Image (spheres, rainbow, N blue to C red):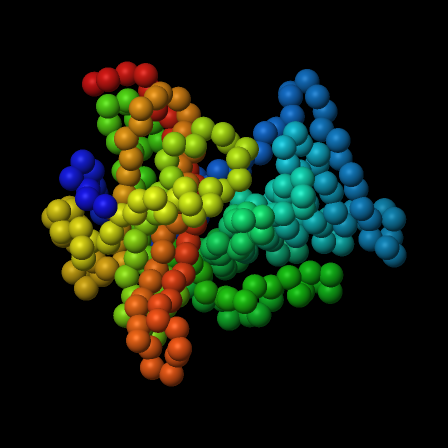
Amino acid sequence: MTTMGLLFVVVVWVLYAMMKNLLIIFILPLIFTACKENSKDTKPIEKLEFYSDNSNLTFKKRVILENCDSLFYFYRNGQIFKRGKIQKNEKPFGIWNLYSNDGKLREIREWFVIDGHSRMNRAWFLDKKGDTLAWRDQDSIFNQKEFVNDTLGTRATNYNVFDFNKDTIDLNEPIRGVAYCNSRRIRDYDSQIRVFFHSESENFNSPFPNDSLIRTDHFDNLKTDTINQKWFTDINPKRYGHVSIFGSWFKKPGKKLLRGYMEEYSYGPFKDKEIDSMTARVYFEKTIYVKDTIK
């Protein structure tokens, strides 16, 4: 897609630096939970499950909400082990926080429901001080037999970032975003990225759009998008293939739900492989507000 209408003026943060809480502060606001809370006048219904050997110890609490439910799991000492939201069909989505038995946040998981299946999209690992770990040495830090096996297939923090210029825009200006592929999944072959983006959804309880909607248009990386290279002088040109600019204009004012994914891809032929291409996706959501004003 040509980006003539989306020239991008940015202040480029040093996204690669391992600054304290960089990812937590920078990424978590992008997560849209699509879950409506109950009315303030209505006390939420709670369902409790207890440890089988002690009916006084809460193992799980479920808070019934209008469009989804909140789940909490507890250690035997009463501290929260894990908390997050699930759809009414039991599919986890959004941000799930996991804690050590002394109450410290140690892991963050981001879930999306894609084509009816929950998909773990990104994960961040933290040390006891709350700093982001690039790699967690321990296989599991949740020291209780009921939770010790709640582990992922990776112990590496995901440093892929989606950066948007604003949360509120005027009707005559576009939303602009930058995708940074800082955690490549296709490591053994030369890869690049592109972004597929669906920007007109206003149904906040709708499922994630399928490819027939999202793949109608795409945004290339800076290696191809030479027009926007001038705004990224602090980035090594060797990384242009893993940075992509994307955005959209809007015809109507109001709250908007932006959805899409960054696709890392590589074309063969590959040695010792029969396939002719490889892809890996990282999904994103963001809510913005378009004002009914023109400046």
Q: Please say whether residue 163 is visible from this viewpoint.
A: no
**Where is residue 293, by image quadrant?**
top left
| Percent x, y of residue 92 | 61, 47
Q: Nearer the viewer, residue 156 or 190?
A: 190
> What residue lies at 30% left-to-right and 76% top-to-bottom?
269
Q: Residue furthest bottom?
A: 272
> What residue lies at 45% left-to-right and 28% top-to-bottom?
202
| Percent x, y of residue 295 | 21, 18
| In-image side of 282 versus 145 (left or right) | left
Q: Nearer the viewer, residue 265 or 112?
A: 265
Q: Nearer the viewer, residue 136 or 283?
A: 283
| In-image side of 231 versus 278 (left or right) | left
> What residue lies at 31% left-to-right and 72% top-to-bottom?
268
Q: Relative to 256, say whether 259 is above or below.
A: below
Q: Please say whether residue 149 is visible from this viewpoint.
A: yes
| Percent x, y of residue 125 | 49, 59
Q: Relative to 249, say whether 97 is above or below.
A: below
